[in-house]
Image (cartoon, rainbow, N blue to C red):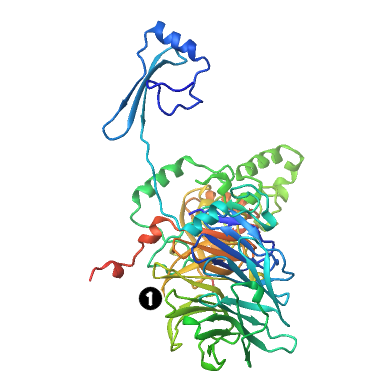
Amino acid sequence: MAPSVNEPPARNWADDDDDVELDAANEATLGLPETVTVEQPDGTRVTTLWKINDDGKKVKVVRTTRMRLIKSQVNHAVAERKNNWKKFGEVAGIGAGPDSNSTSFAEKVFLKLSSTVKDHDAPPVEEEGDSLKKALAAAAKSKISCRICQGDHWTSKCPFKDTHTPLGDLGAAEVKDSGSDAGAPAGAGLGAGGKYVPPSLRNRGPGEAMPGTGSSDRRDDFPTLRITNLSEDANDQDVKDLVSRFGHTSRVFVSRDRETNVCKGFAFVSFYQKDDAQRALEKLDGFGYDSLILHVEWAKSNRD
Amino acid sequence: MRPILLHGHTRSLTKVKYNRDGDLLFTVSKDAKPNVWFAHNGERLGSYDGHNGAVWDLDVSYDSKRLLTASADNTCRLWGVESGKELFRWNTRTAVRQVAFAQGDRMALYVTDATMGQPSTIWVVAIEEDLENQSDEFERKIIINGPKATVASWGDLNKTIYTGHEDGTITIWDAETGEKIKSVKSHDSVISDMQWAPDYGYFITASKDHTAKIFDAKTLRVMKTYTTQRPVNSAALSPIRPHIALGGGQEAMEVTQIGGAKQGKFETRFFHLPFEEEIGRVKGHFGPINTLAFAPDGRSFASGAEDGFVRIHYFDDDYFEFNYEEESLTA
């Protein structure tokens, strides 16, 4: 059917209704206005058409169309190659267009040009000016909690991902242990987590520390734990996250190598409450963290 | 930018080169099958069948009608770019490492390797318009005594031939007489690449001594030096901006960190040409980058690496607007 003047110019077959005659009849009976095409002075065509949509509502569709012819000058030889050259060799006979076997798009890469590039291998410096970003990040953080260590990061980003036993579960195991036969040796040989405790350290209440830790360092008169066998990747925040769930800490010190800034493998944590420290000691000693088993003990102060 | 990834080679890339018009990209690798691709979308146009060994180098004529390839199967071959057919073959005694059309495409040079008792040699041959008359006799032969030539190219107006050697020396030879004109040792290790500026006033060299240098063509004076921490395998000059691109990388056995599955960690580094400072990097390859080429219009570049992939990168708009503060000061 040749389109008449009143029909919209570029008619998409997908928009066509199946039964054109029915619609024409509908239009007549329902009293919808006719479609109108107006040529604007700037060359665009505006088509207004009315129809009833599926909800039975009267819908007015206004289509603005502009036709533009783009001419570009192309090197004659280039055009010749692009249009006329046939494929040969291994790809002879393959149709036009890139073959997905040999051509694909890679992941996005960024080339950020900067005159102040110093050392790309160092970790990126935070931009102080991005307070809005920081505020957003802080807001997001408070809602996220990891299932494994209850830190404010996603579970999949947890530093203790490879441990398989979320710290919460250790507590559950503890409860189970005391109820079963293993409960008997609990006081004798096994510690709270089912771990062996040497006799000298058994039966300590929260009030008793290891002998010799009475006078602590003046800097922290608080119960201090020493965590050793920390992995190199541990940074202050990681250790803080690790211990903060046991209680407030007054000081977290992670030892670093001065030049490389890598963790030397041990850290000191000072809690405000003695029993927080005790619980931390019990839970974290032997805890697998980043493929190393942590060793936690009371910190020995007044070393010679 | 999203690079176009071309995986038409099964072994590591040795050379990528655009034709003069910039619409075709030729790639050769150790897998003996040169390929040609449309640069705008990465569509493979064809492959050249015939070599029996690694192809080390290629050059394409100005009109994009003929292709020369240098291979380890002791041949240097001339191909019809459109047909994919081999048009001529020069047989040699040792592997051919470099090949280059002279300006005007009436002559070509190729360099044979120094193995099996043969010295490193530059062969100059004539290329006939009508291949009926093509002979495999050489016009000139320049024997290199001493460290072998690893890169070779024609100087301005074919008066001279420039070579880079495996000890870091750069030599200028008279193309007519074969005499050595000048020789300078500025690099400490083998020269892996040499690319000319469009006006032939200077060229950039890449060396395994972790640096790339820009030499003045006449005096061989070192104009600029770019230092990295890794052997530089290839260096390219941007045709439209004062940038250079360097590609290199550690030997595969020194790599201790496994990169992410989707994207490798080997990078092309961009330096500011006059200021000699690094200005950016483009990651992506899974192996050391062996060859780099800017498109003639400077709006894209291609890199080929040990991993067998070629990546064509079209720069984003901000690449063209980048300027140092000093550069944007108006006089």
Residue at x-position 38% and y-position 42%: A69
**To which quarter of the image does residue B148 belong?**
bottom right
Give x and y (percent) for residue A94. 66, 49
Visible residue check, residue B13: no
Report whether A186 appears left or right of A240.
right
Q: Disc 1: which chain?
A: B
Give the crowd class for mark 1: few <14, some 14-19, many >=20 residues within 10 Å: few
Give x and y (percent) for residue A82. 54, 54
Q: Which of B64 and B26 is in front in this view?
A: B64
Return the residue at label 1. B274
Give x and y (percent) for residue A288. 65, 54
Residue at x-position 71% and y-position 63%: B49
Q: Where B94 sits versus B269, above or below?
A: below
Visible residue check, residue B129: yes
Give x and y (percent) for residue A192. 66, 47
* Mark 1: secondary structure: loop
**To which quarter of the image does residue A197 belong?**
bottom right
For the residue marked with disc 1, what is the amino acid? Answer: Pro
Q: Count up the numbered dots.
A: 1
| Quadrant showing the C terminus of chain A | bottom right
Q: Nearer the viewer, residue A242 or B308?
A: B308
